[in-house]
């Protein structure tokens, strides 16, 4: 009776099972995976946020497939502040970035076509792709004093797609980048963008750039300054002209308002490709018309909320990162990987080869930390790390929770 694409294995994994049991017993949890900004003690201006939704214009229905103009103009102003000019006719509002992905997958790909995604990265892609009958092919990010696109690996992934067992007619339709990536915190460099454009052009593939964390950039650290030959960070993919490019972002991270459910797609690139993409996206968006008038009318004010939220988040993330480094300086076994932005840090576990009998998988460590210390972290495989040896922590929790949790992690892993 049911479709094969919803035939998931819904058995909870060992970590969620243990978490559920712990919650049921009422035991304390230091949650270092918390990345819901509405639960991390930030100060939101309730009057302003709720007031933004009380707009009399929302009493009339003026359907517009792209979303109300007043909202698109606010999005264009957001990019203008970053020095990027965006035409409001090239903006489509969606209920979330996830929905935006779905529009684009349907726009670009036939069932069985492929989209290249970075590895490690955000775990939702598997679900999004499967729901739209796409196949994902990972391309590697390499780590060398900071993460960056492994160009040879990306080319190999492209080659493997054309020589693999794909059904006749299937193809790579898009290369996806997350800028900065979750959880590696790495930005795409200008010269890597040139490379990506070249790859996309050769394949007639589009570029999809997820910039939800783009405003959360750290000042370049020593390792990044050393690697300056890698080129400048790309300001925004919304300025890309060399290939058909879709740039995604939204309120969930920009203004730390995930509950408002509002995001967008900006379309750029060669004129002919853009024209066809806009025509077709208009039909997709018109079919759903998923953004409500109260939200669209509120967007200009909700985007302004970022001016009070982003400084709080940057302060929190910076403080937790410093606290993390203080803790790690006490441990020779544990370290963290270089990051350039975003809301996460990656802990590197003792070298698996040196650990001997003490060796455990990331998941075993996560289970042990939860069971013995009540500390919740994500094992690297949640983010598809290609090898063991990584735990991922959110930098958003209140400093006392973060520090308490990190102390326990350092004590256990040392
Ligand atoms: C890289 C990335 N893109 C998109 C999203 C989700 O955004 P939205 O709430 O707009 O669907 C997340 C959420 O954590 C994310 O990490």
Image: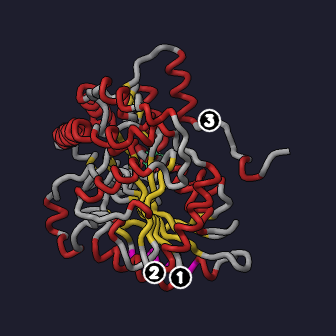
Kindly tell me whether residue 9 is visible in this rendering.
yes
Q: Where is 153 relative to 264, above or below?
A: below
Under circle 1, the secondary element is helix
Q: Is residue 61 left or right of residue 371?
A: right
Left or right of residue 232, residue 169 in this image: right
Residue picked out by circle 3: 12
Q: Main SS type for the magenta part?
A: helix
Q: Could you say where residue 4 lies in the image, as x and y percent from the top left?
A: 77, 52
Q: Are marks 2 and 1 in contact (CB under 8 Å)?
A: yes
Instruction: List the residue tagged with mark 1.
Output: 203
**Which structural element holds mark 3?**
loop
Q: Nearer the viewer, residue 340 or 331?
A: 340
Q: At 33% across and 74% down in the image, what residue appears?
A: 192
Extreme-top residue of the structure? 26
Residue 270 % position (x, y): 44, 79
| Residue 243 percent location from the top left of the image | 43, 77
Tell me how the rendering is colored.
secondary structure
Q: Is mark 2 within 8 Å of ligand 1?
A: no
Q: Does the magenta segment cover residue 329?
A: no
Q: Which corner quadrant of the image does residue 39 belong to?
A: top left
Which image quarter: residue 55? top left
Camera-side residue of 303 and 39: 303
The one nearer the camera, 278 or 117, is 278
| Quadrant (top left, top right, bottom left, bottom right) of the N terminus | top right
Disc 2 on helix, strand or loop?
Answer: helix
Region of the chain picked out in magenta, as a range: 151-160
| Distance (Cα) linking label 3 and label 2 | 39 Å
Whether tag 1 and tag 3 are in contact, CB under 8 A, the answer is no
Residue that label 2 marks:
199
Q: Is residue 153 magenta?
A: yes
Residue at (38% x, 43% y) in the render: 251
Q: Are marks 3 and 2 in contact (CB under 8 Å)?
A: no
């Amino acid at each position: 009776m049911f479709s094969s694409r919803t035939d998931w294995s819904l058995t909870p994994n060992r970590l969620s099972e243990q978490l559920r049991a712990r919650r049921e017993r009422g035991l304390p949890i230091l949650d270092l995976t918390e990345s819901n900004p509405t639960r991390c003690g930030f100060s939101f201006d309730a009057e302003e946020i709720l007031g933004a939704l009380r707009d009399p214009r929302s009493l009339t229905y003026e359907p517009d497939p792209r979303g109300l103009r007043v909202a698109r103009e606010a999005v264009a102003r957001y990019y203008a502040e970053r020095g990027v000019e965006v035409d409001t006719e090239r903006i489509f509002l969606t209920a979330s970035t996830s929905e935006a992905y779905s529009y684009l997958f349907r726009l670009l790909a036939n069932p069985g076509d492929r989209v290249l995604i970075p590895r490690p990265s955000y775990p939702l892609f598997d679900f999004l792709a499967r729901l739209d009958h796409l196949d994902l092919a990972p391309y590697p990010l390499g780590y060398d004093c900071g993460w960056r696109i492994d160009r040879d690996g990306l080319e190999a992934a492209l080659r493997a797609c054309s020589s693999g067992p794909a059904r006749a007619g299937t193809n790579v339709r898009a290369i996806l980048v997350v800028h900065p990536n979750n959880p590696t915190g790495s930005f795409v460099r200008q010269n890597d963008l040139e490379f990506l454009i070249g790859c996309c052009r050769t394949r007639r593939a589009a570029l999809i750039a997820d910039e939800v964390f783009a405003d959360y950039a750290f000042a370049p650290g020593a390792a990044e300054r050393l690697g300056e030959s890698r080129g400048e960070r790309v300001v925004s993919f919304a300025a890309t002209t060399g290939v058909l490019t879709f740039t995604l972002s939204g309120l969930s991270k920009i203004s730390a308002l995930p509950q408002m459910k509002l995001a967008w797609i900006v379309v750029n690139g060669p004129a002919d490709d853009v024209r066809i993409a806009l025509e077709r996206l208009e039909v997709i968006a018109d079919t759903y018309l998923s953004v409500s008038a109260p939200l669209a009318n509120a967007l200009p004010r909700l985007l302004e909320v970022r001016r009070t939220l982003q400084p709080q988040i940057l302060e929190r993330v910076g403080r937790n990162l410093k606290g993390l480094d203080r803790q790690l300086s006490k441990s020779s076994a544990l370290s963290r990987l270089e990051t350039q932005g975003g809301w996460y840090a990656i802990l590197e576990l003792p070298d698996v080869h040196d650990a001997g009998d003490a060796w455990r998988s990331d998941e075993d460590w996560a289970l042990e930390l939860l069971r013995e210390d009540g500390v919740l972290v994500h094992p690297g495989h949640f983010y598809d790390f290609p090898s063991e040896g990584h735990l991922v922590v959110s930098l958003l929790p209140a400093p006392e929770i973060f520090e308490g949790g990190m102390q326990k992690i350092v004590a256990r892993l040392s």
